[in-house]
Image: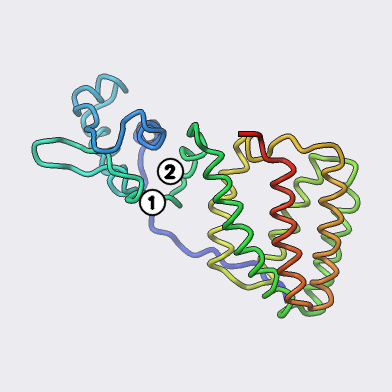
Amino acid sequence: MVRQASTSTQVTRNRPALAEAVIRALVHDVVTEKYAPGTALPSAAVLCETFTVSRTVIREALTALAEKGLVAVRQGWGTVVLDRESWSLLDTMVLEAIFQRDDSLLFMDQLIGIRTVLEGLMASSAARQIDDDARAVLSRQFDALNAALDDPEKYAEEDIAFHSLVHRISGNEFARAIISSIQGKARLVAQYTGAPPTGHNELTHEEHRHIFEALLSGDADASAELMRAHISRSWARRRPKG
């Protein structure tokens, strides 16, 4: 039985929109290395003037950056930018900024590596756990892929839905959360979508067909191998040169 995962309650700090805007701007500047690791951010007075906000807003923003592992207060130095090893890389704002870096393609390659491993694992689990209800839902989703084959934009939506369904069937909530948090931001970047060559959708669809058939048959090994190959090949076809 395929069940929609329940949404856990997350405790988050409610910040005014103005503070959120300042936080987002500073996260971008730190992650894209406008401020290099080991250097200090401008003083609170300068930041107040730059963003035309109060010291209270700046204090809130700097607290948020510290929570994300981007900065730390150093006695005699001020607010110092930390090395990448300290960053909370799965934080929504940090991820968003990572994919705006000049070397964002490197991070996208790493994302594909993560997807290859985790989605292969989830495909294997889905094949072992699939039941008649899940087969019916997966069959309807594959029919939706078939119907959208001549509409690239619609096909991209159904492609995402197909993968998401496999993730749900697998029951691996941690893997789902990791892929969702990272890929959700990557999809917003034109480089990640790329410029697929002619015939990309047809090749992708055949790969989906093989995955679909392996899942229906409950072949865990084939499902994992086919999913890994599909993700790698799809990226190779659409990956920008660089």
Q: Amino acid at mark 2?
A: Val
Looking at this view, name the residue that lies furthest to the front.
242
Q: Which quadrant is the C terminus positioned in?
A: top right
Q: Name above or below for residue 112 compared with residue 173.
A: above
Disc number for residue 196: none
Kindly state the secondary structure of the residue where label 2 is placed.
helix
Front position in the image: 21 or 96: 96
Residue 95 position, x and y percent, is: 48, 44
Q: Position of residue 230 (x, y in %)?
A: 75, 57
Q: Which residue is mark 2?
A: 94
Label 1: element kind: loop
How many labels, in total?
2
Would you say 190 lies left or right of 130 here?
A: left
Residue, disc 1: 88
Describe residue 12's horizontal placement relative to residue 205 as left or right.
left
Disc 2 and disc 1 in contact, CB within 8 angstroms: yes
First of labels 2, 1 by sequence position = 1
Residue depicted at x 38% and y 58% = 11
CA gap, disc 2 to disc 1?
Answer: 7 Å
Q: Please tell me which residue is depicted at 69% across the width and 61% down the height of the picture.
A: 228
